[in-house]
Image: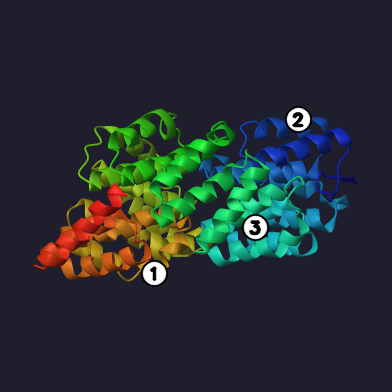
Amino acid sequence: MHQDCFGLPMTAASHEAVDHYDETLRAFLGYRRDTGAHLKSALGADPDLFMGHCLRGYFFKLFTLPTLEHKARESAEKARKLSKMISARECEHLEALEAWCAGDMIECTERWERILIEHPRDILALRLAHYCHFYMGHSFAMRTSIARVLPYWAANELGGGFVRGMYAFALEENGDYGAARDTGEEAVALNPGDAWAVHAVAHVHETQGNRRDGISWLKRTEAGWKGCNNLAYHIWWHRALFHFELAEHDEVFHLYDARFRADVSEDYLDISNAVAMLWRLENNDIDVGRRWAELADKAEARISDHLLVFADLHFAIALGADKRLAALDEMIETMHSNGDGVRNTQEKVLAQVGAILTKAIRAYYLGEYVFALRLMRPIMSRVCAVGGSHAQRDLFTQLQISAALKAKKYPFARALLHERTNLRPNDIRAWKLLAEALDGEGRGREAEEARQHAEALLAA
């Protein structure tokens, strides 16, 4: 037994292997591009490093690619063969990995939470639980998970800043914006390379409509996060959102082409960033050129993935936007065949929400807006189950509003937009759309007031 850098007992053949493992953890927490290289060094120093094989399996699962699922299972099988002489904590990690490989995100998250009760300094269990709570839409659990361990992490120690960065994001997702901003800024002050904390504060600015403050925040912190892995693309996407809301469309296209879609990767998060931005632009009557085609090509290759419903929905929008309706129909068929058995966590979400919302997306792109609304209305309160952040799921909220306006269901559109402007009073676009809905109802004076309010917000 050795100890890792957070003081936890760890089965390993040498200090060298543990040192490489520790650096892998630090790189993982910091979204660094050298994470995989450090894990390779750890397993090179000790080919039987139990937690190294668990971590390898976790990483393959995080990629969310069907082609890597067997590699995750191979890692779990290798760890199982090494499990005769390990600690109870390490065994729980193996059980968590095996549950995740079986598609049971609830069980694997429960395993990590059990670890954290006895070992609140297991930052790997904390980070992975944070991820799965996030992609199951469990915002409250995301916050409580970190609140339980926070007393065990001093602000100025190794890892303390990362824990605070996670807590800042959890606070934001639970609507505690003041505490989220303070905690996130503290985390970045402790560690300028904490991209997740930078991202958490960006979310606060986005939700509260602080567009210029958000741009300023990301510019000030850029040196710390621009070199990290593809989370940097997502942060660039957040900056583009601020520019979009200020109607600075040239800057949005610059960020799209030069920053968050320059890589044209197959990663689902990168594709989701691009889809969400192109949809907003087109919905604002901005010509996006041929940019949909590249996304649709990648989406069409993944119509039967269904590892993460959040990703599926963005693939569906790309297909619909590029008029690849045959591929979208095939995707819906595979959703039904996957959802019929309801074998795992994501398949359950697929059956209850994902397939229905995908049909609504298909109807939207066929111009069947009334049918799209009929599909969406009963499930919108459950869309949180697809995971992602409030800012990411806002795409589906805006899709419903757009469908209502296109269907000329102006009273319903007005109701949705009153809800939105109440929750997001600084949302310029929402006030403009509210004016459109009010005009449709023949309420010209109220529409003009809404337009004037939007203009005042833009000028502020």
Which residue lies most toward the right here? 1
Residue carrying label 3: 99
Label 1 or label 2, whichever comes before in sequence order: 2
Front residue of 414 and 332? 414
Kindly identify the residue that appears in the image at 81 percent across and 40 percent down.
49
**Above or below 1: residue 358:** below
Q: Label 2 to label 3, Cα distance in Å?
A: 27 Å
Label 2 or label 3, whichever comes before in sequence order: 2
**Above or below 455: residue 443:** below
Residue carrying label 2: 41
Q: How is the image coloured?
A: rainbow
Q: Is 397 left, or right, of 344 in this rendering? A: left
Q: Residue 63, located in which quarter of the rendered image?
A: top right
User: Could you classify mark 2 by the number of other residues whose Cα lies within 10 Å: few (under 14), some (14-19), or many (20 or more)?
Assistant: some
- Say what amino acid the circle numbered 3 marks: Ala
Residue carrying label 1: 381
Q: Is 367 left, or right, of 379 in this rendering? A: left
**Above or below 460: residue 298:** above
Label 3 or label 1, whichever comes before in sequence order: 3
* Element type at mark 3: helix
- Say what amino acid the circle numbered 1 marks: Ser
* Element type at mark 2: helix
Q: Residue 87, located in which quarter of the rendered image?
A: bottom right
Q: Label 3 to label 1, Cα distance in Å?
A: 28 Å
